[in-house]
Image (cartoon, helix red, strand yellow):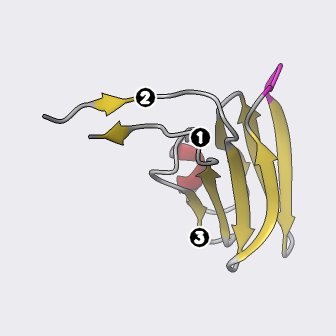
Amino acid sequence: LTYLAYTRGGGKTAEVSSDGERIAEISLRNIDSPYEYPIEKDGHINILLVEEGKISMKSADCPDKLCVKQGAISTGAYPIVCLPNKIVVKINSDDSDADAVSR
């Protein structure tokens, strides 16, 4: 028998990295109102939209805008990747914040 248990809360954060180096860690908890978080790297600008429990790439100066079209992420399943600007955004959770547990 298999079932999924979903939990909410805990220490969810978004980790922003470039060339394998962490450049920011953003808490996704206790966000009263959405806000923009600019990432400037090598003359390029990406703007993240931070909301309660999720994050998205609001805008980017890359040519294809695939990172913007991806939409918001709220789990660690798929990161947001802006290849031209070398920016990766992924969700991290502490051990008490499981999105799904299969038994």
- Secondary element at image label 1: loop
Q: What numbered label is drawn on residue 74?
A: none
Q: Is residue 31 magenta?
A: yes
> Magenta segment range?
30-34
Say which amino acid is labelled 3.
Leu
Q: What numbered label is drawn on residue 83?
A: 3
Q: Position of residue 57 (x, y in %)?
A: 67, 46
Say which amino acid is labelled 2.
Tyr
Residue under numbered circle 1: 96
Q: Is residue 90 magenta?
A: no
Q: Image point 62% across, 47% down: which residue?
A: 93
Q: CA distance from mark 1 to mark 3?
A: 32 Å
Residue under numbered circle 2: 6
Point out the residue furthest to the left here: 1
Q: Tell me which numbered mark, 2 or 3, is placed earlier along the sequence.
A: 2
Q: Tell me which numbered mark, 1 or 3, is placed earlier along the sequence.
A: 3
Q: Quadrant where the N terminus lies?
A: top left
Residue mark closest to the camera, 2 vs 3: 2
- Secondary element at image label 2: loop
Q: Position of residue 62 (x, y in %)?
A: 67, 62
Front residue of this view, candidates 73 and 43: 73
Q: Image point 67% across, 72% down: which residue?
A: 86
Q: Image point 69% across, 70% down: which residue?
A: 85
**In the image, 29: left or right of 6?**
right
Q: Position of residue 43 (x, y in %)?
A: 86, 71
Point out the residue furthest to the top here: 32
Say which amino acid is labelled 1.
Ser
Q: Quadrant where the C terminus lies?
A: top left
Q: In the rendered view, would you say 85 is above or below 36?
A: below
